[in-house]
Amino acid sequence: MLYGPQPSMPASPLAVQLHDARRSGTMCDVVFVADGREFHAHKAVVSARSAVFHSMFGSTFLEARDGRAVIEGVSANAFDKFLEFLYLDHISDWGELELELLQLADRYMVDHLKV
């Protein structure tokens, strides 16, 4: 295993509540599709955590207008863990998805995932 659970502070109560809202689809305004599976999220959260998502959703890109983004070349499980990191600033169980998660970190400019 290259990476494992990061030694970090516990997620704030707000982060946990937003993550729970994402998991239940509450107040979500964007849908990601990875490996045929839909993931609901909040543009404000993912945009604050990723410069790429910030550019994508703060522009006239199709994704900003449609509120839908297709994520190519990644498993649904890895993308779910990636969203977990964006919301909570840690990943509870990498589940042998290290390589995919590091590729997502590079692709979406989330360098603090690689620490």
Image: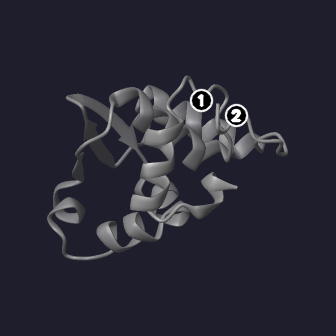
Q: Quadrant of residue 94?
A: top right
Q: Amino acid at mark 2?
A: Gly
Q: Position of residue 20 (x, y in %)?
A: 57, 31
Relative depth, front residue between 104 and 54: 104
Element marked by disc 2: loop
Q: Mark 2: few, some, or many residues within 10 Å (few <14, many ≥20)?
A: some
Q: Is residue 115 left or right of residue 99?
A: right
Q: Mark 1: few, some, or many residues within 10 Å (few <14, many ≥20)?
A: some
How many numbered discs? 2
Q: Residue at x 16, y 56 (%)?
A: 66
Q: Is residue 77 left or right of residue 3?
A: left
Q: Amino acid at mark 1?
A: Trp
Q: Position of residue 99 (x, y in %)?
A: 48, 40
Task: Give the numbered dot on residue 4.
Answer: 2
Q: Residue at x 82, y 45 (%)?
A: 8
Q: Quadrant of residue 59?
A: bottom left
Q: Quadrant of residue 39?
A: top left
Q: Residue at x 18, y 63 (%)?
A: 65
Residue at image mark 1? 94
Quadrant (top left, top right, bottom left, bottom right) of the N terminus: top right
Relative depth, front residue between 4 and 61: 4
